[in-house]
Image: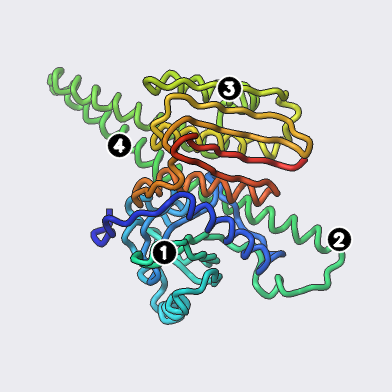
Amino acid sequence: MHASQPEGRQLKLRDVIEAMRRLGIAARLEEPQAGSVTDARGAALAIVSADGMFLSANRSAAALLGYSSGELIGRRLLDMAPESDRATLAAQLSGDPAREFYSFSTLLAGRTGRPTRLVLHQQLIAADQNEDLARLTLFEEPLAPEELLEDDAQLSEAEARSRLKYLMIGQQRERQRLAADLHDGMGQALTLIKLMVEDARMRLRRGQAEDAAQKLDATVLQIRETIGEMRQICGELRPLALERLGLPAALSTLCRGVDRGAAHLLVHFHCDIDDRDVPEHLKADIFRVAQEALNNSVKHAAATEIRLALQRIETGLLLTIQDNGTGYDTRPLSLEAMSSTGLGLTGMQQRVESQGGFLSVHSSDNSGTLVSASWTL
């Protein structure tokens, strides 16, 4: 973790979710025709201070810049900008600190050192009077050059070709990102395993059987970790249970897993629709929202009972996750907890609402927390 990481700062999930809603509306109004690369892991989100220091970041934002979430916290946007762009970025960050929403384009170089053009959308997060201002920041990779976004007159055929081009660019960038994940994670892990096996073989040839056995035991542990990392990467691209089982069965399996894994917790599942009733492009988002909401209830709500339901309503689909806990959306979360849980659910909110849906979180000390997500069909 970076040496300058701030300590003691807390935010409320409710305030971050509301900031995400306002950010999404403002960004769509500002650039209604803009295209951007969407990470399969969800929106790249971070919470930054007024001067551009990372206070919290989700996995998508960290991966976009080549870091883990923990490594990114405490770093400064200015330090990631090429020297020739730092004065411009400093001016963009040092505007009116009370402005609610602001978007700007900048070059940022992550761990690789290669500058990438990114669009940053920043929304002020509601804070107590004694708190420094913090901004929810959405990082996007623009697909279209800025001059093309300003061209109003396009024939329908030309527009179709343009959209296809942007889709292909987005697919290519997502493939590059996946390749980087495989190279940096799997590639290094497999190289280490190869070296460990070669070391064990050399020890065997020298007659050091006990030392070789210890080295092979360590190799087995490394292989298990690598398998876990591979499953995580595949699961982030698309939950494997969706492919094997379909959405209703995948949600049921998810609920059973939480029920078995958490002591003194009972998870109920209800679904009155078939897998074929759910549009293909919504299935992963529905599963992710359920996954994030269950995770938050287990970690923060102190609940003994959770009810998850997916049902058909008059206007479309409704997913609800209700627990009987203490109500976590109004309770302050540390920035570390916000990275792993709050920004996860907030990222799913961005995905839901970008598809025309709506996500809300309501809670009280007496009735627990209710997470609702709806999609119009």
Q: What residue type is labelled 4?
A: Leu
Q: Which amino acid does label 3 sit on?
A: Phe
Residue 272, horizontal then vertical, whole percent? 70, 23
Q: Earlier in the sequence, mark 4 or mark 1?
A: 1
Which numbered disc covers residue 157? 2
Q: Against 368, is 224 above or below?
A: above
Question: Which residue lies under the disc numbered 1?
Answer: 134
Q: Are marks 2 and 4 in contact (CB under 8 Å)?
A: no
Q: Earlier in the sequence, mark 2 or mark 4?
A: 2
Question: Which residue lies under the disc numbered 3?
Answer: 269
Q: Earlier in the sequence, mark 1 or mark 2?
A: 1
Q: Which of marks 3 and 4 is nearer the N terminus?
A: 4
Is the residue marked by circle 1 packed among few (<14), some (14-19), or many (20+) residues within 10 Å? Answer: many
Q: What residue type is labelled 1?
A: Ala
Question: Which residue lies under the disc numbered 4?
Answer: 192
Give the side of residue 277 with respect to residue 367, left or right. Answer: right
Q: Nearer the viewer, mark 2 or mark 4?
A: 2
Q: Do the residues labelled 3 and 4 touch (CB within 8 Å)?
A: no
